[in-house]
Amino acid sequence: MIVAGDQQLLKQINRMALVRQLCGAPGLSRAALAEAVGLTKSTVSLLVRELMDEGWLAESELVATGALGRRATPLHLDTARLALLGADLGVGAARLVATDLLGNVLAERALPYADIADPAACVGLIADELLAMTAAGGALDGRAMLGLGIGVPGVVDDASGVLRYAPHLGWRDVDVAAGLRARFAAGALAGLPLFIQNEANVAALAELEFSGQAGVDPLIYLSIGYGVGAGIVVNGRLLTGLSGFAGEVGHTILQQGGPRCTCGRRGCADALIGLRALMDQVDGGSGAGPERLERLFARTADGDAAACRAVADAGRHLGVLLNNLWVAFDPMCIVVGGAALRLGERLLGPGRAVLRDCAAATRLPAPVIRTPGFGDNGTAIGGAAMARHHLMRPFGGQGADVAPPKPARF
Ligand SMILES: [Zn+2]
């Protein structure tokens, strides 16, 4: 990537290089930091002073060892003075969190929608709750808000930040960021950097930024909810594709001539593994109501033969999808998350077995498959992770505020 910028951008790039270095290797001294990022010690001292004044960095306590001479002071991210906001526009309700710079949750809210058919009202409700959550006197009092990341169960246009289509919310062309900005305009959150992405992308960033495991890359987060999607991180960046649609693996075809998918194709992963398809198979109805979902979970947990057979079939298709993702991206790790995790080993077991067979047949080691490090708030925490991810990469990021120009599409 060719990056050109003025002195201020260059300085911000250098500042955030120091912060990123300390994310991966906390405890470095100023001298070690200078060596790691290739800046002079005096520049690093100056930038560290600024970052400490602003609440990004703090010095660790020196442990007395009795050794003579001046010892270097270890540095780490300051968790006491700044906060990141995350929002998950889930199908049943919105979840909101505020975290410190390391992803520790400081405040959280679950917010049922008054009327899901009115997206503007839902966005307004979320804005009001965020304003209340960050108001003076609460758990976040005294902290400066750095940014807000929003995860949505749908396709986001990467250039404009507009939610193009969220089938399970029934929303089309909703400018979530503009709605929030309008509500924030006169208050304490005016001008807050906003970022919006598909939920699987956001969850992938939670694993990348906040799992405490540095260097897991490439990383794929496979989200199995009503539908199936993936967030793909390669070289420390989200792979979003030309228009932000990369990772829509729910519409990769796993079975030619298979069941009809909502997209019009046949045999898509969505139609074979997604919870909506499983519900349709098991109880014969239609729609995405939470009661139907609970019925599916309950029947599977009770060992109902038809439900368990359907879930095991879905698990084997999951294994095929895992194999295909392995072959396409050679990931170090695939995190399998989403509401379908409640089906437990009845779903994951057959998936792992198919992948194991593929690995045995090719005599190649399969990637690590694991479940997410975050619970019900995973997407909301991922929103906070996305805000940190972009703020720490000021050299042309991804998101509603800093979209790169797009080539014409033919
Ligand atoms: Zn499809």
Image (cartoon, rainbow, N blue to C red):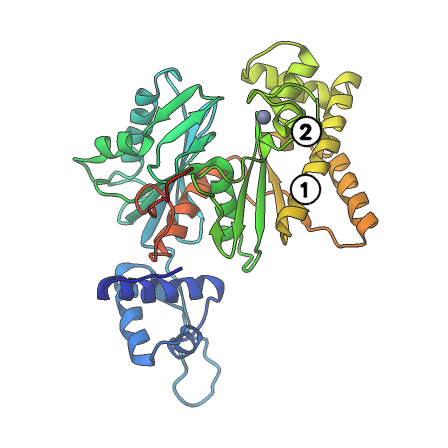
Viewer-proximal residue, 158 or 53? 158
- From this view, report whether residue 24 is shown above or below residue 186: below
Of 294 and 3, nearer the camera is 3
Locate residue 283 relative to residue 71 in the image: left or right.
Answer: right
Q: Residue at the far left: name it.
A: 186
The residue shown at (31%, 69%) is 48
User: Would residue 377 be visible to someone looking at this image?
Assistant: no
Q: Nearer the viewer, mark 1 or mark 2?
A: 1
Direction front: furthest residue: 410
Callout 2: CB less than 8 Å from ligand 1: no
Residue 65 in the figure: left or right of residue 54? right
Tag 2 residue = 343
Q: Nearer the viewer, residue 348 or 304?
A: 348
According to the picture, the residue beneath numbered tag 1 turns out to be 324
Three-letter code for the amino acid on which mark 1 is drawn: Asn
Residue in the image at 29% along x and 62% along y? 4
Instruction: Say which element carries label 1.
Output: helix
- The answer to whether residue 389 shows anywhere in this view is yes
Q: Residues within 10 Å of mark 1 (few under 14, many from 20)?
A: some
The answer to which of 295 and 319 lies nearer the viewer is: 319
Say which residue appears at 54% left-offset and 35% top-offset.
Answer: 248
Position of residue 361 in the picture relative to residue 9 (left or right): right
Q: Quadrant of residue 316?
A: top right
Q: Residue at x 59, y 37 (%)?
A: 337
Residue furthest bottom as drawn: 68
The picture places residue 165, in percent across and down from the top left corner, at: 43, 26
**In the rendering, at what x and y percent does residue 274 appear?**
62, 26
Where is the C terminus found, in terms of image quarters? top left
Residue kind at label 2, given as amino acid type: Leu
Taking the image as four quarters, which one is ligand 1 found in? top right
Image quadrant in which you'd find residue 295: top right
